Image (cartoon, coloured by chain):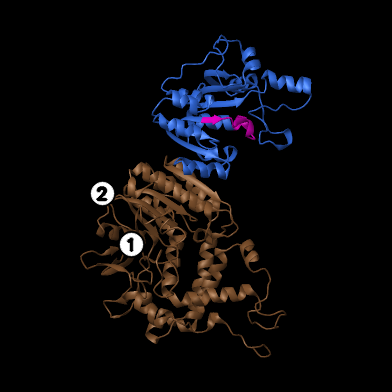
Amino acid sequence: MVGVKSVPSPAISAPAISADDRSHEVDHPSSQVAKFGADQPLRLDCGVDLSPFQIAYQTYGELNPDRSNAVLICHALTGDQHVANVHPVTGKPGWWETLVGPGRPIDPKHYFIICSNVIGGCMGSTGPASINPATGKVWGLDFPVITIPDMVRAQAMLIDRLGIDTLFAVVGGSMGGMQVLQWTAAYPARVFSALAIACSTRHSAQNIAFHELGRQAVMADPDWHNGGYADHGIHPHRGLAVARMAAHITYLSDAALHRKFGRRMQDRELPTFSFDADFQVESYLRYQGSSFVERFDANSYLYLTRAMDYFDIAADHGGVLAKAFAGIQTRFCVVSFTSDWLFPTSESRALVHALNASSARVSFAEIETDRGHDAFLLDVPEFFDISRAFLQSAGKARGLTGKNNQ
Amino acid sequence: MSVQEVLPLNGFTAEQSAHFRADHLLVAEMVKPGSKVLDVGCGDGDLLQLLETRGIDGRGIELSREGVNRCVAKGLAVVQGDADTDLVNYPDDAFDYVILSQTLQATRQPRVVLENLLRIGRRAIVSFPNFGFWKMRLQLLIGGHMPRTENLPATWYDTANIHFCTIKDFVELCDAIGVKMERAEALDLYGRPLRLRLPWWVWNMFGEQGVFLLSRGGRK
């Protein structure tokens, strides 16, 4: 670094809120929690019975008398149960308040909305950041590897606990969309309608490659300590921030980045001839990285990216995707975005073809936008119109009338 | 009403008859209630909606995003896709009927599309504008320019339609690929079926569009 000016970087400085707030949320979330004791273990795909365990969740709206208006929202990789309320750690609005909330397509006035933190997460559901009851210490890498089907199995136990037999809708984007598809493949009779957004039935080689990049960044951080950083009272925030920065690029598109930042400089006219964040896009990424480490656990990131990598519905059905959905009665709506290169339209199309081959009732729309994969979290009116219309027509078919549908 | 006798459209209310396009009513009448139908190029989903009123399980494919969005908004199961490229992905015998309504002329490979229709569905219903219609002939013969009609208003350089044919051409195509013609109708300028049992050349001259119910020829 000799001869180079100082390298102030929010991405590698210690986070501001962080550790205490976050670690408190891991075992004692400020949302509802469903605890499952020794008599109700979670059977994991890796062969381990996880027990005891807990699932943290939020609900909005009311369950109607015939329990037919429940909507399960599945969160994406780094999301959590705080879909439509202020986040307890960051103080920011819910991650899907564009879609969920009063007057929104998924309105608590009509639906009983449930969103749970996935197993392996770090916002109150049992995961690698939780305390292992057997040792009294943080699980770390002793936590068993989990899969998307494991997450869905745990959600199903939560739905059972809530006394709901059939979900009116399961909705999710990205990793949440994978859960939606897993729900329909594993519990077809329990899902009346499914809205799967910007997702795929399997993680592609390119996607796995990006995840590996992120994991290696975490593991390369000396503070990671082979996953045992909790014992050292530190957090590998530098590695995790780099992982987040790389991932964040895949969530956007070249066009969106260019529109937002171009080659504009940050607070200066001329380059500093250093590795300072001269460009706006650099400081944006550093900000994304640093704000992420405040709320997310590094080991959780490893486990959840792994779960996505392993996901392949067809492989679980003899390599024939259509078999996963044979005879299914669920009404599907699949949505993709033109500029999404993480889960491109071609993957949604393959899913739709399989659903058609299974005789499933499926709608599919590709939304034109330059905002990349992230579009499903942003204000994209065409996407909301479709979601609203799909749920309304499904509501009609489900007999949700009056108060619960208009 | 000697030439333009309106067919009795069984099972439709006066309201439906007034609300839906005449060719849609005719197509819907050809479909047995309770069957499973794929509408290729379903546009805004009007035909699918009509079919649903008859207890028919309908699905659609539509090229335009706007069309798909409007269909989904109506609660229809419609997939964004292209008849030329996407039909190959549908398995054999997936549907009782596959409908191609006013879309044949916009496909790149009408013959391949037609063959696919009768692979995916046990029956196919195809309707298309008849380029042998007297007004078309007259516009080309007298006017010396590519015909434009109320149903086909686009100019030659600005149209999605690339493979026009006449009723006669279509019948020849059906013969060429061994498709059995179970029922044929020609509709006049007002969408009303021409009287049955007219010679082909009359239909070819006076039918503004043709509507055909097809089934597999030698195969079952």
Any part of residue B123 in sight: no
Task: Decide whether residue A29 is among the magenta residues.
Answer: no
Q: Of residues A221 and B143, which is closer to you in this image?
A: B143
Is residue B128 shown above or below A223? above
The brown-coloured chain is labelled: A
x and y percent of residue A262 in the render? 67, 68
Q: What number is the disc on residue A66?
A: 2
Is residue A345 shown above or below A245? above
Secondary structure category for the residue under label 2: loop
The stretch in magenta equals B99-112
Q: Is residue A390 left or right of residue A265?
A: left
Q: Colour of chain B?
A: blue
* Cα–Cα span, label 1 and label 2: 17 Å
Amino acid type of the residue that numbered disc 2 sits on in the rendered structure: Asp
Do tags 1 and 2 sit on the same chain?
Answer: yes
Q: Residue at x 55, y 22 (%)?
A: B211
